[in-house]
Image (cartoon, rainbow, N blue to C red):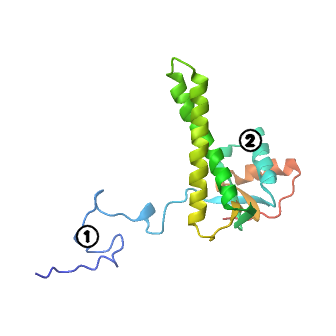
């Protein structure tokens, strides 16, 4: 049996044939934001300054807050984002076991404290046993997990997201008030543009 097909892939809000679309669990599909161009972004904003580091942008917003500006209508926007992965050191099976032992010891301490609360006898011994067993199992799991990678990642690292500059934006209808306050602050931004 052949079912008639409807061109649902090319359907746009407001086009005829919308009644032919199958409804989903939440009802008929709707365009995001109501206009078909993604989520609504809110009121228009104006960039009142761009700064090379976050503390400078934070100082600006703090100054605005101290002078009665409605800071809930402002934002700090990081631009020119870069993902930086800082290599912390070499990872060996022994080091993986040591890190696993530390993590396991914390978990064992938690379990030991939990059981120690309900122990009528020597609760310190219960806590110590939980800590030791957690450390042993953590070391075993850490070593095995590292050995199973087959040398694909023999280093530890920490990732961070960094911005090239930080823009302070405010809603367009309060931009003039923000600029006047910043004029009294005597902190020079690197640029001011409309968004």
The residue at the point 79 percent across, 49 percent down is: 60
- Residue extending farthest to the top is 120
Mark 2, Cα crowd under 10 Å, few <14 / some 14-19 / many 20+, is: few
Q: Viewer-proximal residue, 27 or 156?
A: 156
Distance CA(mark 1)–CA(mark 2)? 50 Å
Q: Quadrant of the N terminus?
A: bottom left
To which residue does mark 2 refer?
Answer: 65
Q: Is residue 152 above or below residue 178?
A: below
User: How far across and how far down the image is residue 94, in percent?
Assistant: 68, 57
Q: Nearer the viewer, mark 1 or mark 2?
A: 1
The residue at the point 77 percent across, 54 percent down is: 54
User: How far across and how far down the image is residue 108, in percent?
Assistant: 57, 38
Quarter of image, res 113: top right
To which residue does mark 1 refer?
Answer: 21
Q: Quadrant of the C terminus?
A: bottom right
Secondary element at tag 2: helix
The residue at the point 79 percent across, 44 percent down is: 63
Q: Is residue 185 above or below residue 41?
A: above
Horizontal arrangement in the rendering, residue 27 relative to residue 122 (left or right): left
Horizontal arrangement in the rendering, residue 48 relative to residue 109 (left or right): right
User: How far across and how far down the image is residue 66, in percent?
Assistant: 77, 38
Can residue 67 be seen from the camera position used here? no
Secondary element at tag 1: loop
Mark 1, Cα crowd under 10 Å, few <14 / some 14-19 / many 20+, is: some
Q: Is residue 131 above or below residue 154?
A: above
Quarter of image, res 110: top right
Count every numbered label the image shows and give the total: 2
């Amino acid at each position: 049996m052949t079912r008639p097909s409807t061109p649902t892939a090319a359907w746009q809000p407001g086009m005829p044939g919308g009644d032919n679309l199958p409804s989903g669990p939440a009802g008929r599909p709707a365009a995001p934001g109501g206009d078909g161009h993604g989520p609504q972004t809110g009121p228009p904003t104006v960039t009142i300054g761009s700064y090379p580091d976050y503390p400078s942008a934070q100082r600006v917003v703090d100054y605005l807050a101290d002078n009665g500006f409605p800071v809930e209508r402002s934002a700090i926007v990081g631009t020119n984002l870069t993902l930086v992965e800082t290599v912390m050191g070499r990872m060996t099976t022994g080091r993986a076991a040591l890190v696993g032992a530390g993590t396991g010891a914390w978990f064992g301490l938690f379990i030991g404290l939990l059981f120690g609360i309900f122990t009528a006898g020597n609760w310190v011994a219960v806590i110590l046993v939980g800590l030791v067993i957690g450390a042993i199992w953590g070391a075993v799991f850490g070593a095995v997990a590292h050995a199973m990678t087959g040398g694909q990642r023999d280093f530890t690292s920490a990732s961070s997201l960094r911005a090239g500059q930080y823009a302070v934006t405010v809603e367009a209808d309060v931009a003039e008030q923000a600029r006047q306050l910043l004029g009294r602050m005597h902190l020079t931004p690197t640029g001011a543009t409309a968004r």
